[in-house]
Image (cartoon, rainbow, N blue to C red):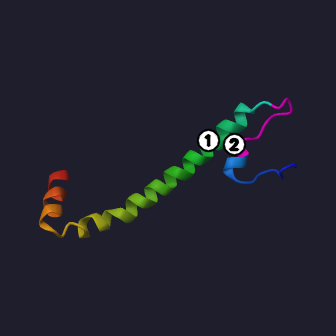
Amino acid sequence: MRHKRGGSANLRSRKVNWHGEADPARLQDARASRLGELAKQKSKLARVSRPGEVAGCTSEQARRTCEAEK
């Protein structure tokens, strides 16, 4: 079964050259693309979680923990 060009990052990272060996350039491109996607997700999560951290420090123990981290 042949796959169309493109597809998911997982399939792109498994592309092989015409010798049947993994193509290092394609593997590196797929890894870089995936790392970029993960970095974007991480920065989004960091922005979303900041307000929650302040609001989440309501109990006495949580308040002390939050103050100690600052």
Local SS, label 1: helix
Residue 15 among magenta residues? yes
Of callouts 2 and 1, the N-terminal one: 2
Instruction: Name the residue tied to disc 2.
Output: 13
Q: Which mark is residue 2?
A: none
Picture coordinates of residue 13, whole percent (x, y): 69, 42
58 sits to left or right of 27: left
Circle 2 residues within 10 Å: few <14, some 14–19, many ≥20: many
Examine the rendered structure and indicate whether residue 36 appears above or below residue 51: above
CB atoms of marks 2 and 1 within 8 Å:
yes
Residue 55 among magenta residues? no
41 sits to left or right of 51: right
Q: Residue at x 66, y 43 (%)?
A: 30
Instruction: Name the residue tied to disc 1.
Output: 31
Picture coordinates of residue 2, whole percent (x, y): 87, 49
Q: Residue at x 39, y 62 (%)?
A: 47
Residue kind at label 1, given as amino acid type? Arg
Residue kind at label 2, given as amino acid type? Ser
Q: Which residues are magenta?
A: 12-20
Q: Quadrant of residue 45?
A: bottom left
Examine the rendered structure and indicate whether residue 62 appears above or below residue 29: below
Local SS, label 2: helix
Q: Quadrant of residue 62?
A: bottom left
Q: Main secondary structure of the magenta part?
A: loop
Q: Residue at x 83, y 50 (%)?
A: 3
